Image (spheres, rainbow, N blue to C red):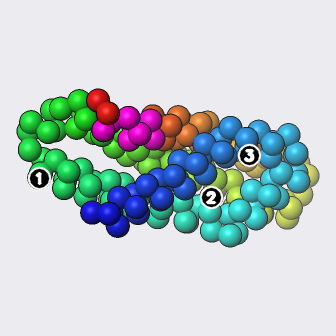
Amino acid sequence: MLLLRLLHVVLGVFWAGTLIFAATLLNPAVKAAGPDGARVMQRLQERGMLNVMPVVAALTILSGLLLYWRVSGGLMEGWVRSRMGITFALGGVASLAAFVIGVFVMRSAALRATAIARGLEQVPEGPARQAQQAELQGLRQRATGAGRWVAGLLGIATAAMAVARYL
């Protein structure tokens, strides 16, 4: 139980902290830096950020589900309906929503944007290049917007996990 809780808390702090940092500080700074900022994001992707974060998120969620199961005594109705049980469940639902948005909206938009950005240098000036630049801009906005949602949901999940035991 101790190891499971340690895993859940450490991975959860990493997941939530990274996404909240990215949404509130990193992404605005990258946008303000222009092409240099885009290179920073490419380097993060090259280091595996878009592959590491879903694994960290999945392990956080799985360890949380196991903790919920164990603490609830196998989903005993009285505990599940308690304020603590409901609060943990709400935090879990928020983290599941963050995971889905993060993987299927934010990550996919970022991967597509990276692919377009890499190929953009070979596209000659003209309508085709302008269309790709517009698509790239839209994908970046989609990823940034999704990142804000993920950060907000992870903030809710973190708050729920922090206070559930005291309700």
Which residue is more in the foreground, 120 or 66? 66
Residue 157 is at least partly visible in this image: no
Quadrant hosting residue 166: top left
Residue found 34% across the figure and 43% down from its top = 92
Q: Dot 2 corresponds to which residue?
A: 111
131 lies left or right of 47? right
Indicate the quadrant containing the N terminus: top left, top right, bottom left or bottom right: bottom left
Mark 1, residue position: 74
Nearer the camera: disc 1 or disc 2: 1
Q: x, y percentage for residue 64?
A: 32, 53
Instruction: Pick whichever, 38 or 125, lies toward us.
Output: 38
For residue 26, the mark is 3
Quadrant including the C terminus: top left
Nearest the camera: 165 or 37? 165
Q: Callout 3: few (<14), some (14-19), or many (20+) C-alpha neighbours within 10 Å? A: some
**Residues shaded magenta:** 157-165
Three-letter residue code for mark 3: Leu
Q: Secondary structure at mark 1?
A: loop
